[in-house]
Image (spheres, rainbow, N blue to C red):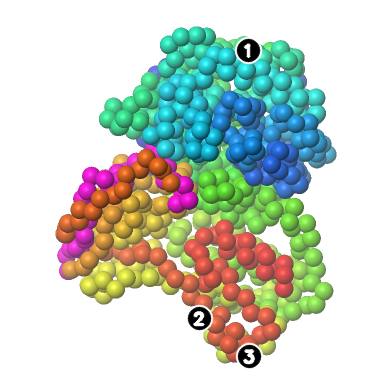
Amino acid sequence: MQKQSKSIVKQIVNHTGDWFNDSARLDKGKMTSELYPYKKLFEPIYINRLKIKNRIVMGPMGNISMADETGKPSQKMIKYFIERAKGGVGLITSGMVPVNYDIDPSYGDLDAKGIFPRIDKHRTVISGWRAIAEGCHAYGTRFFIQLAPGMGKVGNPECLIKKKKLPVSASWNPNWYITQIPCRPLTNRECRKIIKCIGQVALDAKEIGIDGVYLHGHSGYLIEQMTDPAYNRRKLGRYSKWQNFGLDIVKEIRKRCGNSYPIHYRIDLSLALMETYGDKMNKDKTLKKFKNGRTAEMTLNYMENLVKAGVDVFDVDLGGYENWWMPHPPNGMPPGVYLEVAELVKEYFRTKNIKSNAGYPVPVIAVGKLGFPDLAEEALRKNKCDMVMLARPLLADPFWPKKVYSGRVKDIIPCIGDHEGCLGQLAIGGHPHCAVNPRTAFEDVYQDDMKPAYKIKKIAVVGAGPAGVVTACTAAKRGHEVILYDNKSKAGGMLIYGSVPKIKYELSNYIDYLNNEIEKTSREYKLTTMFETQVNEELLRLGKFDAIVTCTGGKPLIPPIEGANLKHVIKGIDLLKNPYIAEDANNIVVVGGSDVGCEIAYMLSYEMSKKVTVIEMDKHFMKKTCTSNRGYMIHHLERKGVKLINCAMLKKISKDSVEILQNLSKTVPDPYVTWTPVLPDSIKNPFSKPIEKEYKSIKLNADLVIMCTGARADDSLFEKCTQNHTAPEVYNIGDSFSGGRVLEAVKAGYAIGNTI
């Protein structure tokens, strides 16, 4: 078992970059319905003595900024969870809920207020939690509350500046956001106080009708820090034995709540830092501290002891904050990425005949990109897991369970794994929502949406990207007569080209969904599509429309560089339209290190085995991208030997080379660092040193140069229609307004579709 567990961890880590070379694995990421009817997904199951109606669990999605300043769940949060219960999920878990604000200063802002919902301290918060539990129960769905004793080293380091208090951890560990800030070790007394707080909060949850508690023991949060030797290097006291903190928490809950109250534990089989970073674990001063992490074999033993202490159910994955893409798999990672982990744990429990205190086998919940109905059903049928956890898929479509049950798989809004609306919001002050579903976490706002139009209008929508499709379908469903124009042969806009790299397989699913949505809406409502049609202001004027919505996208920006007009210089979109352009190229330079440039470099290196260099003016690549997606991309580009050159300016392009001006100062950040995040511009690191200027002209061999230097909004049609009063109402949304992101396009389309 030890050899097998090590092998599985290593295999998963080693193949998260090139997994798509297995075509059968790639096919698992399609929204197919070959296994309908889905019998296993909709079998009931017991957790302790609690019966769950099906095998589908809503995973925690960090419901921050969805409560008032006291921590009381707002109407936004209540309706958000109840919407998922309406959709048919068997069990819902909340996002992280602190149990004590006194010990971990990184949780709250000043005056003990913060962004997290609370269930401790004030009785005023209880009504919100009761509303959630009762609302879920009304639809036959169970609700567990996720309890977290602290964030520790991954908490907000601003507590040092605002409160003059150091962040805390298990030992002296560097803060994840700002490594120069140390986190002090918790005292044994503080540990005991946290444990008592968890026991009390669990009992409070039980008393107000919440069905179970869920311990946040993975991904590098405080329980993980106390129960993993990577972070817990204590020498004295009860909690120098790394299992004791977690075991004492479970025992305290059992003592307070009795033997029949469900306890769910979230854990990673391993942080997998050694497997991820290899020799860097010995060289980097931050990583070096975390060398002796908990192995898979140690975790299995710990899980066995947790069951003896009272845990009833687990969900299991890999990774932590230092390799954040592992526990938060972005769009490039494979479907069902951690099924082998769940299967390993099940086999361990089976061979050792490990059962819960209720006498049942311990259910193991599989996690990680399981929003593909056939894949989820197959995993259950093959006994790889007992339940499947869906987090982002249920943000994309809360009615995933009902649609799957009835065989309407094509109608599911698929997650695209971009983290724009969910995970990416947490660092910039937003609350979780969804790029492809405008109603997610806005159920409190869109209570009167989709009302039939009181006056039927003739509407032209120009452009069938996400903004145009959502606008057209929403307006048509409200009764309007809509004509949707596009110069391509199908809907999808720029996403059609963005889905070309194999790691963007989820975008392909979304494009299929958009076209299916158009087809279905056209059958049932007054929606007409005019594909392969060039639209100008005159055509729209002749159409005598009551409203025009332009969603005409953007145009690539090409800087005025000498040599930019040479034949071997192309735009990123040109390569995506015709990848064979690069077939004979040996040395490729990509200009621009944002998402598009890095994804193109990835495709060229992994799918076409090309030698690639990416140059970027900024000190960071993919600066505005969610940390999970950014870390995944940069880590795997390095593994494939892609050269990333930051703080560099393109000066000239020649027939077989490019000339760049590169800052060679040692103060330039290492572009391959993925174990700490890029801070938002609004948060300054007081310890960071200014970058010194030491520029040198350098030539790079290049027989193909790909320009990925951004785009500008193309609002020319909108301006012409506005100036000529082509229709009484003229709107401009999507990339032709601002953008490049599905998130804003979809939200705008839904808002306009509901407004006209």
Tell me the residue at 36%/64% (across/down): 709
Q: Is residue 666 magenta?
A: yes
Q: Quadrant of residue 753?
A: bottom right
Could you tell which of marks 3 and 2 lies nearer the N-terminus?
3
Quarter the N terminus occupies: top left
From what the image shows, is residue 276 above or below residue 401? above
Q: Which residue is mark 2?
A: 716
Question: How far apart are the two marked residues, 3 and 2, measured between alpha carbons?
Answer: 18 Å
For the residues bearing labels 1 and 2, Cβ distance under 8 angstroms? no
Magenta-drawn segment: 655-683
Chief secondary structure of the magenta span? loop
Residue 681 x/y as whole percent? 45, 52
Question: How far apart are the two marked residues, 1 and 2, measured between alpha carbons?
Answer: 67 Å
Could you tell which of marks 3 and 1 lies nearer the N-terminus?
1
Tell me the residue at 61%/32% (across/down): 380
Residue type for callout 3: Leu
* Residue that sits furthest to the front in the current view: 164
